[in-house]
Image (cartoon, grey):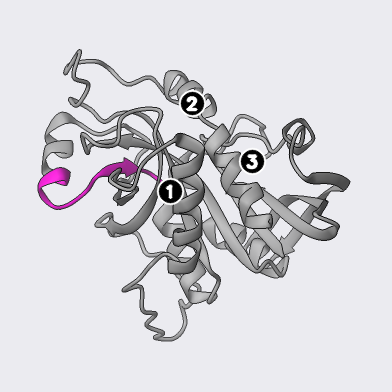
Amino acid sequence: MRLGVIGGTGLVNMDLAKRLDGVRATLVRQDDVDVETPYGPVPLRSFTLEVDGRQCELIFLQRHHNASGHGCPPHKINHRANMMAIHDANVDAVVSVCSVGAIAATFPPGKVALAEQYVDFTGVEMTFHDDEAVFTSVTVPFDEAMNAKLEAILRTSQNYGEGELMHYTYWLTQGPQFETVAEVNAIETLGGDMVGMTMPREAKLAAELDLPYAAVCISSNWAAGRDPEDGAKALNHLDVSAQANDRLEPVWACILGMLE
């Protein structure tokens, strides 16, 4: 298994050595490499692990990477370079870790679940095919076998029974501003369960590359107007990031479970 992992606000760094205590895995080697793609350079971190007596590879990409080190804003991410780099690393599948704002009442902050569908009405094209007409099916945008395995891992790691909802629809917003209350109300009416600014663009490119892809979504905050204790509460990026990084145990369970 060569597993690609894409992290964002919900997984800023991949400090794998600290996560292997009590796990049937040993870190054999770690390398940082800069990959050249036709769309620009991309830094990747490669881990060689021994799991149950066999070696596997984990390739980590921080989607917000940039030269400043302060994090590339969502509307400036070079998704084509990122996805080409992870594809060229010859991974078998990609697990994308996303921080989202929750609209659905069943997806409170702290819960980790999966994307089953997405809606992208931003009007921003995202394709590798600028010079010819290539139409890629995204009827099922996320790999069903991966989602089934990840669902089982997330239920176990969060002590959820079979009745707990684990699949939601991700609504892509343009950003970098958070949404208004009116926008969130409209998004819910049109079928959105959570909002975010990045992931579906990766999913589209993964489909063009025929790369199995799944999105593990951390509910980091209530979307605008949805906090049951304060409907007028302003959203703060630092608070959102802190909450997302406090809920990484189920995410690590997904990553290590996929490698096993």
For the residues labelled 2 and 1, the Cα–Cα distance comes to: 15 Å
**Type of amino acid at the residue the image marks with label 1:** Thr
**Type of amino acid at the residue the image marks with label 3:** Asn
Task: Locate the N terminus and report the quarter of the image it occupies.
Answer: bottom right
Q: Secondary structure at mark 2?
A: helix
- According to the picture, the residue beneath numbered tag 3 turns out to be 66
First in sequence, mark 3 or 1: give its number.
3
Could you tell whether 79 is left or right of 183 in the image? Answer: right
The crowd level at tag 1 (other Cα within 10 Å; few <14, some 14-19, many 20+) is: many
Going 79% across and 35% down the picture, which residue do you hit? 17
Could you tell whether 131 is left or right of 7 in the image? Answer: left
For the residues labelled 2 and 3, the Cα–Cα distance comes to: 18 Å
Going 55% across and 33% down the picture, which residue do you hit? 248
Which mark, residue 241?
2
First in sequence, mark 2 or 1: give its number.
1
From the top left corner, tell me how far across and down residue 162 is, in percent. Answer: 33, 48
The answer to whether the residue labelled 2 contacts the one labelled 3, judged by CB atoms less than 8 Å apart, is no
Instruction: Point out the stretch of residues depicted in magenta.
Output: 187-197
Q: Is 195 covered by the magenta stretch?
A: yes
The crowd level at tag 2 (other Cα within 10 Å; few <14, some 14-19, many 20+) is: some
- According to the picture, the residue beneath numbered tag 1 turns out to be 198
First in sequence, mark 2 or 3: give its number.
3
